[in-house]
Image (cartoon, helix red, strand yellow):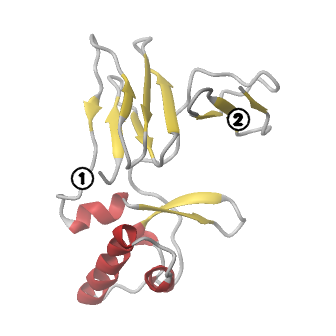
Amino acid sequence: MIANMWETPDGTVLWSRHVHDSVFYEDTNGERYMVDGGNDYCHLSDSKEHPMKNRCIFNDEPWEVQRKFILRGTFDQDGNRVWVPLYKLSNGHIDSLVADTNIPESTKINYLTEQAYRKEHKINIHTHDYAFDGVQPISSPNPYVCPHCGSKNVHCHAGMMVDRYECEDCHFDWR
């Protein structure tokens, strides 16, 4: 699986980008939905009466599709963590990922494929383009509220025994 994405009945797409990236959403129908597991597994909290639609992207899609959904965690010019689609990384970044001996071969194959695709299609990107023109790869709002500042911008870090929550605004952390 390349992108673990599911569409709720009101059209909101939930995208879990990595393991334990639990994405929560309360639909306009009042039902609560959740997607977790990133590309490693798919864990859903769905509704039998109003089920989500599978919008997952798999590795049998053409490369032109895959390269728009394979994400690389990196940092923007201000030092903020961002998820950039493979096709928007600079050629220099792709080359350094290919040369990195610490990247598993199962991941590196994507960088090698992109490198070959760019060579074949004469694509040369000099700088990163952090604007995302597809489904936004950010967690959707969830039903949790920060007890410290009242923000609904809360991320759930799912654990083996206990989930941990972190407010993205004030960085308050609780279980």
Helix, strand or loop at disc 2?
Answer: strand
In the rendered view, does 153 fall on the left or right side of 66?
Answer: right
Q: Which image quadrant for residue 52?
A: top left
Q: Residue at x 79, y 34 (%)?
A: 172
Tell which circle, 2 or 1, labels the residue nearer the N-terminal end.
1
> Which one is in front, 53 or 29?
53
* Circle 1: residue type: Phe
- Residue identifier under label 1: 58
Q: Residue at x 48, y 79 (%)?
A: 97
* Circle 2: residue type: Glu
Q: Residue at x 36, y 57 (%)?
A: 69
- Residue identifier under label 2: 166
Image location of residue 95, percent across then percent down: 45, 86
In the rendered view, does 175 fall on the left or right side of 41?
Answer: right
Check residue 171 in the rendering and tell me which mark sits there, or answer none: none
Q: How far apart, in angstroms, are the residues tagged by discs 2 and 1?
A: 30 Å
Looking at the rendered image, the quarter that the C terminus falls into is top right
Helix, strand or loop at disc 1?
Answer: loop
